[in-house]
Amino acid sequence: MNEHSEGDTGRQRIRARVENSLRPLTLPNFLTMLRMAMVPFFVIAVNEHDFRLALWTFVIAGLTDSLDGYLARSLQMRSRIGAYLDPIADKILITCAYVALTVPQGQSVVIPLWLTILALFRDFLIMVVALVLYLVEGLRHFPPSILGKLTTTMQVVTITVVLLANLAVVPGWLPMTCFYSSFILVIVSGFNYIYRIGRMLEEKRQDRQP
């Protein structure tokens, strides 16, 4: 009888852990979804040449990114859905911002088309490789690298500088520095990602060997 009760308790704990990891309606996940909901308003503001509104929208979206991570850690509200949604929300915001600020609509400063193409191709390549590795090798976890985080940070800085350059006069070298810094990080982080994937596959192959 005791063994049966302990078994039921164990199953209940496992079920509770699964439900907690999958539950979408937490405060951090709400902030993440709010960040995604702000993307069309950012694009509309850029299209309307309201760069002040676009800048504030981008800044607020960035604050929600920092806040949802802090709340998830401090309030112990980490969830599996949140772990997937957070990077997706970041990527949607950055991608849409890059595209919106690349299309020439009479702005003073635009993000160069070549930089946007390279950044989008890198992200597309990473997504395709991750999907193939998941389907073929069962690899699900791809921890972000320092180079990847630096690339994202530089992209955020680039977007902010371009928005500011369309609001006020900024030194001409500042946007160009951001563009070429982003370019270097996109290339280096892309090759680093390929290298890391190769290492992961090699380790997995060695683990399968008798």
Image (cartoon, rainbow, N blue to C red):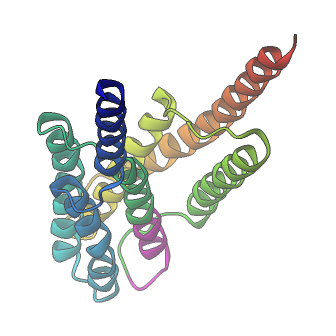
Numbered range of the magenta stretch: 95-106
In this image, 57 relative to 130: left or right?
left
Residue 72: % across, % down: 20, 42
From the viewer's perspective, is residue 68 above or below residue 9? below
Residue at (43, 35) in percent of width and height = 150
| Rendered location of residue 62, percent (x, y) | 23, 54
Q: Quadrant of residue 205?
A: top right
- Image quarter in which the N terminus is found: top left
Q: Is residue 96 left or right of residue 192?
A: left
Locate the C terminus by quadrant. Answer: top right
Residue 207 part of the magenta-drawn span: no
What percent of the width, then of the height, locates residue 169? 22, 62
- Extreme residue toward the top, this view: 210
Query: Measuring 15% from the left and 56% from the top, which residue is drawn there?
Result: 27
Q: Nearer the viewer, residue 198 or 179?
A: 198
Work out whether residue 203 or residue 183 is closer to the camera in this orientation and state it. Answer: 203
Q: Residue furthest front?
A: 1
- 101 is within the stretch colored magenta: yes
- The front one of 30 and 67 is 30
Question: Horizontal and vertical percent for residue 156?
Answer: 35, 51
Given the current orientation, which residue lies at the most extreme bottom position?
Answer: 48
Placement of 51 over or under 165, stated as above or below? below
Label tally: 0
Question: Which secondary structure type mostly characterizes the magenta part of the structure?
Answer: helix
Is residue 181 or residue 20 the one in the foreground? 20
Q: Residue at x 41, y 51 (%)?
A: 87
Residue 114 lies, with reference to residue 106, above or below; the image says above
Image-based side of 170 in relation to 130, left or right: left
